[in-house]
Amino acid sequence: MTCALSHRPARLAIRFAAVALGLAALFLSETPAPQAPGFGLVSRAEAIIGRPLTPLSYAGVARRTTRRAVVGGAYAGGAYVAAPYAVAPRAGCARVVDAYGRVYWRCI
């Protein structure tokens, strides 16, 4: 039992030294060096004004398609879709645009 107790202060000192070394490395790595851009845990982020945040993601495509459908009315995905002939809707039907920009008739 005396053997286990004699190692306890040494283990505590090693743990304390490891934590102190880890914190020192963390704080030193967050200080950017002037000759090394991007040095540290987090690189610098730059935004381009006017570009979509999510150019190819599902959320970005759905957001832009919905905006185009709402703003453009009969525009679907930014391109005008013309029917070869006009059909009058039945009484009680309304044209609806869903979240993905699809235009369809909803009859009650």
Image: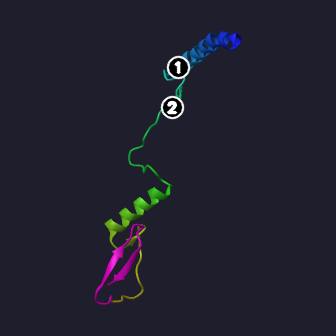
| Badge 2 density bin: few <14, some 14–19, many ≥20, Cα 10 Å | few
Q: Position of residue 95 (x, y in %)?
A: 33, 79
Q: Position of residue 92 (x, y in %)?
A: 28, 86
Instruction: Name the residue at the front extreme.
Output: 1
Quarter the N terminus occupies: top right
The image shows residue 91, relative to residue 59, as above or below, that is below
Q: Which residues are magenta?
A: 89-108
Element type at mark 2: loop
Which of the 4 image quadrants contains residue 83? bottom left
What residue is rendered at 57% in x and 15% in y? Answer: 16
Disc 2 to disc 1: CB gap under 8 Å: no
What residue is rendered at 44% in x and 37% in y? Answer: 46
Question: In terms of depth relative to the viewer, which is nearer, 54 or 23?
Answer: 23
Amino acid at the residue labelled 2? Val
Write down the residue under mark 1.
23
Q: Position of residue 30 (x, y in %)?
A: 49, 23
Quarter the C terminus occupies: bottom left
User: Quick check: is 43 in the magenta stretch?
Assistant: no
Amino acid at the residue labelled 1? Leu
The image shows residue 1, relative to residue 75, as above or below, that is above
Alpha-carbon span between mark 2 and mark 1? 16 Å
Labels 2, 1: front one: 1
Question: In terms of depth relative to the viewer, which is nearer, 66 or 52?
Answer: 66
The image shows residue 7, relative to residue 49, as above or below, that is above
Write down the residue under mark 2.
42
Instruction: Name the residue at the left extreme.
Output: 91
| Badge 1 density bin: few <14, some 14–19, many ≥20, Cα 10 Å | few
Q: Earlier in the sequence, mark 2 or mark 1?
A: 1
- Which mark is drawn over residue 72? none
Which of the 4 image quadrants contains residue 49? top left
